[in-house]
Amino acid sequence: MEEESQLSPFVYWAQTDTTITLRIELRNVQSPYVDLQEQSLSFSAVGHGAQGEKKYGFNLRLLRLIDTESSKYRVLDRNVEFSLTKMDVEFWPRLLEDSKKPAWLKIDFDKWTNEDEHSDDPDEGRDIIEDFPGLYERMQAEELGWPSKRESMKKVYLFLYNLWQFVGFLYVVCVMATRYLKDGPDSMAGTYAAVGWMMRLCLLTQGLEVLHPLVGYTKGSVAEGVVQVGGRAIIFFCLIEGEERMQTKPVIFYLFLVWSFIELVRYPYYMLRVYDVDVGFITWLRYTIWIPLYPFGFILEGVVILRDIPYFDETKKFSVSLPNSWNFAFHFPTLLRCYLLFFFFPAMYKMMTHMYYQRIRKIGPKSWKKKFM
């Protein structure tokens, strides 16, 4: 660690496959002190730096090992230069072991070269950007504060995906509200016919949320995405689209409304978070609106399951009866009954508990005492 009173000079670093070079911006250096170890470098000297003629110094903990025997340095009139030989021939993704880089340590992009570029044979030259795809771009982005192309495209994609979902569910709510204002409760029977196609598109594209964690686009777990997206998919594609008589029930109106209200808050929050924008009210709404809506949604899904059981008992849809070539039997209504009896309330408890802890982590418990003090 550096002493608090010690100033740090500007240090520019570059690398080849085999060497790390450091250029310390100090003029008229006097009494230099150098301690070079296999994974650390300490330097101090009196010289003319950014803050005048003073004593400057720094300590660096390197990412990889260096060969101290073949490494060297020299003191020039305008700077101090180090040439550190790497133990292994490789490009380092960064200089320091710590991912947090001090402000005075800069990348010298003018020296971003490979030894083979100076070969007498032009065919032996190597393009570092091609040999190490993304490394140069990532380091330059970190140095200059620019997002990399991949990072920019990821953010654009996530923003557009969340925008699409928001627009889709907004359409569902607007159409349902318009029809209800015009026809009142009589409009409920035609809810699926009016907005079922848009709900289908939204739920189909929500399947991408299972893939996002796999490719590193989001930080959530794959299992969480499977549970949330898969649960709704079963309700919609199997229990609603799989039985036409269920599509005209009033419960579909309320279920679509609850699903849409949840997403009309969730997706704007995600759109803002893509670009690290935090709007307090949206965050509060995201982690509060679930308190009434999640239990209501679970109950509505349970009603759909319960109402569908006699229909599937009658039609035998999704069931497999004996005899058959696989000698296997499956009764779909029995599966639905088992879910309602043994898994419905545990699943609701699990989801509510998960959201509760997320709420605590994001906005924390409120202290009434502090609020009124």
Image (spheres, rainbow, N blue to C red):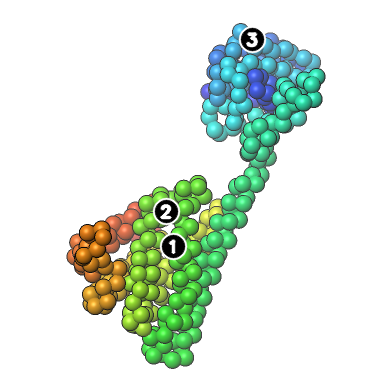
Q: Is residue 78 above or below residue 333?
A: above
The reply to whether dot 2 and dot 1 touch (C-beta < 8 Å) is yes
The local crowd at label 3, few if under 14, some if 14 to 19, many if 20 or more residues have their Cα within 10 Å, is few
SS for callout 1: helix
The local crowd at label 2, few if under 14, some if 14 to 19, many if 20 or more residues have their Cα within 10 Å, is few
Between 51 and 246, the residue placed more toward the observer is 246
Q: Which residue is mark 1?
A: 286
Q: Is residue 40 above or below residue 192?
A: above
Q: CA distance from mark 1 to mark 3?
A: 58 Å
Amino acid identity at mark 2: Lys
Amino acid identity at mark 1: Arg
Amino acid identity at mark 3: Ser
Q: CA distance from mark 3 to mark 2?
A: 52 Å
SS for callout 3: strand
> Which one is earlier in the sequence, the residue at label 1 or at label 3?
3
Residue at x-position 43% and y-position 50%: 220
The picture quadrant where one finds residue 244 is: bottom left
The reply to whether dot 1 and dot 3 touch (C-beta < 8 Å) is no
SS for callout 2: helix
Residue at x-position 19% and y-position 61%: 342
Q: Is residue 13 visible?
A: yes
> Which one is earlier in the sequence, the residue at label 2 or at label 1?
1
